[in-house]
Amino acid sequence: MGKIKVTECPIKGLKVIEPQVFGDERGYFMETYNYNDYKAAGIDMEFVQDNQSSSRKGVLRGLHFQINYPQDKLVRVVSGEVFDVAVDLREGSETYGKWYGVILSAENKKQFFIPKNFAHGFVVLSETAEFAYKCTDFYHPNDEGGIAWNDPDIGIEWPIPEDMELILSEKDQKWPGIKEYRK
């Protein structure tokens, strides 16, 4: 593969990517994306939009997806640390409704590839976090969908300390559970 290490996750299609990092006394250098390397790893996508968000500790964003314009996403953390989650919403998938989570941080430099038809979300574990991601389709505000972050039918094991106050948008407090979504 060359410059990246790709680990397949228990849910087909999800991949954790570790870029090669070149460090010395000055700091480090890494390629955060190289089409040829990703294509060789089975991620042959045309990314059309890059996004970045900044959040403080306890912010939980998700679980989001686009309904008619689904996006593949390649996500990473530029500064700080988050617990990042993908939930399989692919109809007919043997892992429908299952989740997988990974710690992404500026320190570990891991990336998470999330294919179309997965719900996605994260919670910020550090004081602040800068979260960056590439998408294969443009954002369509009228096409948003979501699943409740705490749906017991999914059972995500968020690593949230008891003393951490969660901060959710009004929209993220109102998403239905996966059973209601299927209707």
Image: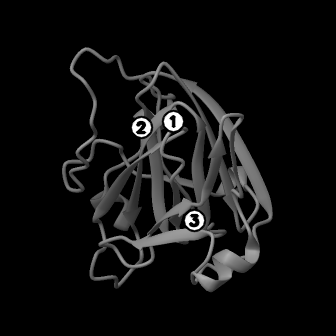
Q: Give the amino acid at mark 2.
A: Lys
Measured from the top left, where is residue 124 in percent x and y?
Answer: 45, 31
The answer for how far apart the CA atoms under marks 3 and 1 are is: 16 Å
> Residue at coordinates 29% horizontally, 72% vertically from top-left?
10
The picture quadrant where one finds residue 159 is: top left
Mark 2: secondary structure: loop
The answer for how far apart the CA atoms under marks 3 and 2 are is: 17 Å
Mark 3: secondary structure: loop
The picture quadrant where one finds residue 83 is: top left
Question: In this figure, which residue is indicated by the disc labeled 3?
Answer: 67
Question: In this figure, which residue is indicated by the disc labeled 2?
Answer: 174
Q: Nearer the viewer, residue 86 or 126?
A: 126
Mark 1: secondary structure: helix
The picture quadrant where one finds residue 179 is: bottom left
Question: In this figure, which residue is indicated by the disc labeled 1?
Answer: 171
Measured from the top left, where is residue 104 in percent x and y?
Answer: 47, 45
Q: Nearer the viewer, residue 7 or 129?
A: 7
- Taking the view exactly as shown, the residue that stands out farthest to the right is 48
Measured from the top left, where is residue 163 in percent x and y?
Answer: 25, 14
Q: Give the amino acid at mark 1.
A: Lys
> Residue at coordinates 51% horizontally, 35% vertically from top-left?
171
Mark nearer the N terminus (3 vs 2): 3
The answer to whether the residue labelled 1 contacts the one labelled 2, judged by CB atoms less than 8 Å apart, is yes
**Is 84 situated left or right of 136 in this image?**
left
The answer for how far apart the CA atoms under marks 1 and 2 are is: 5 Å
Q: Is residue 41 above or below residue 50?
A: below
Q: Give the amino acid at mark 3.
A: Ile
Question: Which image quadrant: the C terminus?
Answer: bottom left
Crowd around label 3: few <14 · some 14–19 · many ≥20 (10 Å): some
- The reply to whether residue 131 is in sight is yes
